[in-house]
Amino acid sequence: MQELIKYGKKIVKAGLAHSHFGNVSKRVGDQMLISTTGSMLDELEGQIVTVPVDPASPDELDVIASTEVNVHRVIYKATSALAILHGHSKYAVAMSMLYEPGKEQIVPEDTESIYVLHEIPVVRGGVGSDELARNAATALRDHKGIVVQGHGTFARGATVDEAYVILSSIEHACTVKYLVDNARRRISV
């Protein structure tokens, strides 16, 4: 639990989400620790609940767990993830809204981002929806991070730290790409 509290603060401090946006979770066996809906990521003390990854029926704590609890569950069931971080970083959201129809990924420009991420899938789906859960889990089978069009980022890892590195890397890649794309437009005018 302390690890999620620590990384919630880091996410906000790094600008990867505003305090009230985003959520964090960690899988522990057949359970997951997850931030509650509406909780502030930089003040998660007492705001993390434990719910089953694969409940036989909706868990009583689902009503206070993050609105993205279903998305986390489906990702955990479909991937090897042991930690999931969800942010709303500015450049990643902006880039997801600028990408051309038919292009379902953001291709980084800088060497480090290409090395860490290769490409970043852009998926669709409403907040907490079954569509988002399916699309996110499918993309995260082969990638460690995604951007939900117009919504935010999801990163998975074997540890919370690894998921944080991916979340940070997505925003770095999207920032560099945005700046390079903008500079290219200005040069070509």
Image (cartoon, helix red, strand yellow):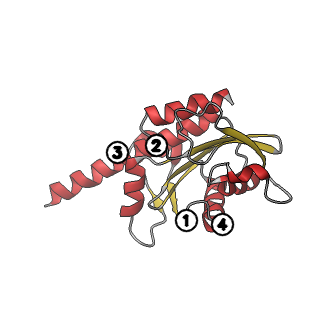
Which residue is painted at 46% across and 43% down in the image? Answer: 17
Q: Which residue in the protein does label 1 denote?
A: 126
> Of discs 3 and 4, which sits in the foreground?
4
Residue 149 pos. (x, y %): 47, 62
Residue 32 pos. (x, y %): 75, 43
3D distance between C-alphas at marks 1 and 4: 8 Å
Quarter of the picture containing the C terminus is bottom left
Which residue is painted at 63% across and 35% down in the image? Answer: 160
Q: Which residue in the protein does label 2 denote?
A: 17
Q: Which residue in the protein does label 3 denote?
A: 176
**Contact check, label 1 and label 4, Cβ < 8 Å:** no
Q: Which residue is at the front of the view, 128 or 44?
A: 44
Which residue is painted at 28% across and 48% down in the image? Answer: 179
3D distance between C-alphas at marks 4 and 2: 23 Å
Q: Which residue in the protein does label 4 denote?
A: 130
Mark 3 and mark 1 lie on one chain; the one further toward the N terminus is: 1
At numbered mark 3, what does the secondary structure look like: helix, strand or loop?
Answer: helix
Q: Is residue 136 left or right of residue 60?
A: left
3D distance between C-alphas at marks 3 and 1: 27 Å
Residue 157 pos. (x, y %): 64, 41
Q: Which residue is at the front of the view, 86 or 118?
A: 86
Mark 2 and mark 1 lie on one chain; the one further toward the N terminus is: 2
Mark 1: amino acid: Gly
Q: Quadrant of residue 182?
A: bottom left
> Of discs 3 and 1, which sits in the foreground?
1
Decide: few, some or many residues near mark 3? Use Cα within 10 Å; few <14, some 14-19, many ≥20. Answer: some
